Amino acid sequence: FLEMIDRGFDVVVGSRYIKGGGTVNWPMTRRIISYGANMIANILLGLHMKDVTSGYRCYRKWVIEKINISSITSEGYAFQEEMLYRAKKVN
C-alpha cells in the first residue's frame, strides 16, 4: 500500500474488490449492492476507482490541503466519495 505512495502516487485507495481484498461475513446481497453502488458513483463522479467507499486510504499532505476538508459537506460513505472527487479535481 505505502509502496504506491513511494512510487509517486498522490492518493492510494485500498479495495475490497481486487485480489487480496474482501469482506468478512457480508451476505451476497450486501456485496452486490456495494459493488453496484460503487459502479454508479464512479459513473456519476467521473472516477475510475475499484472501491470509492473504502476507508483504507493514503493522501499526500498537499492534496488534503488543496481539498480543504472543512469545506466537505457530505456525511457517511458519501464523505469518502466527495474526497476522491475533490482529489481528482485538484490533481
Image (spheres, grey):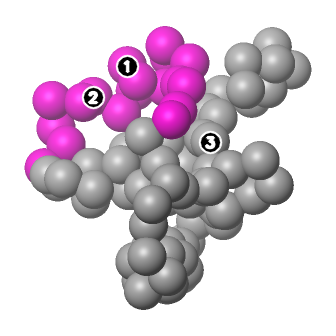
Question: Which amino acid type is shown beneath numbered disc 2?
Answer: Asn
What is the three-letter code of the residue carrying label 3?
Gly
- In percent of width and height, residue 7 lies at 86, 20
The residue located at (82%, 19%) in the rendering is: 3
Q: Residue at x 58, y 65 (%)?
A: 47
Q: Which residues are magenta?
A: 56-73
The answer to which of marks 2 and 3 sits earlier in the sequence is 3
Which of the 4 image quadrants contains residue 44?
Answer: bottom left
Does residue 1 appear to the left or right of 44 in the view shown?
right
Label 2: which secondary element: loop
Decide whether residue 9 is among the magenta residues.
Answer: no
- Nearest the eye: 36 or 12: 36
Q: Secondary structure at mark 1?
A: helix
Rounded to the nearest whole Å, what is the CA distance between mark 2 and mark 3?
22 Å
**Residue 66, x across and y down, in percent:** 40, 27
Q: Which mark is residue 77?
A: none
33 or 71, which is in the foreground? Answer: 33
How far apart are the two marked residues, 1 and 3, measured between alpha carbons?
21 Å
Q: Is residue 12 above or below residue 4?
A: below
Q: Residue 65 — which label? A: 1
Position of residue 42 relative to residue 17, above or below, is below
